[in-house]
Amino acid sequence: MKISVANAVLGILSGIKINKIADKKVKTTLMNDYLHLRKIVKPALDDKNEIAQKFQSDWRDEFVAVETLRREGKPVVGHKEFLEAEADANKAIFALFDKDAEASPKAVSLDSFLVACKGDDLTFEQIATLEEGGIIKV
């Protein structure tokens, strides 16, 4: 599974109120899956934060100027080195999340999941992401 998919699954699961799930088996499975995927994603998130902090530290003065231009909707002109460094940093971050990771979540059935998460606002895309991530089986 791509780390980006695992990260998307974590984002969805983190919004589910686990204490409202009555089915103990579903609750335990989802909690274990969440913790398992979190261990996979955490190093990539830590590396991403390190890259971002280093970039912002190295380009502190120009960072503020470029962000101000962007916020105001003005063209970013005269900051070629900054933009190249920013593109490199973004490419490095993308590569972190594009890696495959060994993930072995224990899926719950879609019906069990929907009953367990009754009351939570889930979209079709979130259900598809959870299925892609192996959290639910259709």
Image: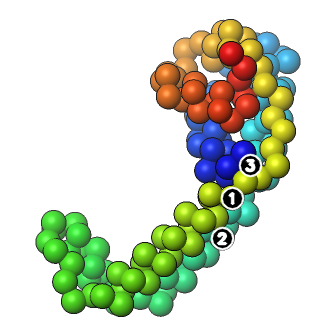
Three-letter residue code for mark 2: Asp
Where, by quadrant of the figure, is residue 41 drawn?
Answer: bottom right
Q: Residue at x 62, y 58 (%)?
A: 97
Where, by quadrant of the figure, is residue 132 drawn?
Answer: top right
Q: Label 1, on which residue?
A: 99
Three-letter residue code for mark 1: Lys
The location of residue 124, given as percent across then percent down, is 49, 22
Return the disc, 1 or 3, that comes first in the chain's sequence.
3
Q: Label 2, on which residue?
A: 47
Q: Nearer the viewer, residue 87 or 10?
A: 87
Q: Label 3, on which residue?
A: 38
The location of residue 20, given as percent across then percent down, is 68, 19
Against 127, residue 47 (above or below) is: below
Return the disc, 3 or 2, that comes first in the chain's sequence.
3
* SS under mark 3: helix
Residue 53 appears in the picture as rendered: yes
* SS under mark 1: loop
Residue 21 appears in the picture as rendered: no
Against 34, residue 96 (above or below) is: below
Q: Nearer the viewer, residue 22 or 130?
A: 130
Q: Residue at x 41, y 88 (%)?
A: 59
Say few, some or many: other residues with alpha carbon within 10 Å of mark 2 (under 14 / 14 to 19 / 20 or more): some
Q: CA distance from mark 1 to mark 2?
A: 13 Å
